[in-house]
Amino acid sequence: MVARLLRFGLYLLIALVLSAAATWGLGLFWVAIGGGDLPLHGWIAMALGVSGTVGLTWGLMALAFKSHREGWDERVDNSMDPGRESERDDDLLY
């Protein structure tokens, strides 16, 4: 249990470091293309946007892996799908 918590903390730390690095890099890019200095509110908005995107991506991928691992993908009833010709998945025509 402790190892799992430490691993989660490490992943969270890595995600935060990557998010901070991406925010810093985007800020430098903004200045390089002539956008002017980024005010504090711009840095905060960019940090929240990058962090939110990383968090949402991480969460959705975790749900996809969890769904696949627990077999939820195989439990879907496709019998009412249009174009389905038989009850077996092997007989589907793509």
Image (cartoon, helix red, strand yellow):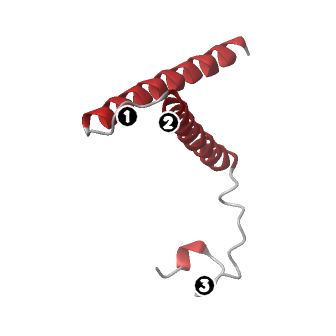
Q: Is residue 61 above or below residue 20?
A: below
The residue wearing badge 3 is: 84
| Residue 35 image point, x, y percent | 33, 39
* Number of marks in the rendered image: 3
Quick check: marks 2 and 3 in contact, CB under 8 Å? Answer: no
Name which residue lies at 55% across and 43% down: 57
The answer to whether residue 64 is above or below residue 50 is: below
Residue 91 locus on image (x, y percent): 54, 79
| Residue indicated by mark 2 | 46
Q: Give the residue type at disc 3.
A: Arg
Q: Answer above or below: position of 72 versus 31.
A: below
Residue closest to the eye, 69 or 40: 40
Q: Quadrant of residue 88?
A: bottom right
Q: Does residue 46 appear left or right of residue 6 in this picture?
A: left
Residue 66, position as x, y percentages in the image? 66, 43
How far apart are labels 3 and 1 at the CA level? 48 Å
Q: Residue type at mark 1: give it.
A: Leu
Which sits in the foreground, 49 or 92? 49
Could you tell me which residue is drawn at 56 percent across and 23 percent down? 11
Q: Badge 3: how crowded within 10 Å, few (<14), some, or many (20+)? A: some
Decide which of tag 2 and tag 1 comes sooner along the chain: 1
Circle number at residue 26: 1
Q: Considering depth in this image, is 7 or 54 the residue closer to the camera?
A: 54
Q: Residue 34: x percent and y percent?
A: 27, 38
Ranked by sequence position, the earlier of labels 2 and 3 is 2
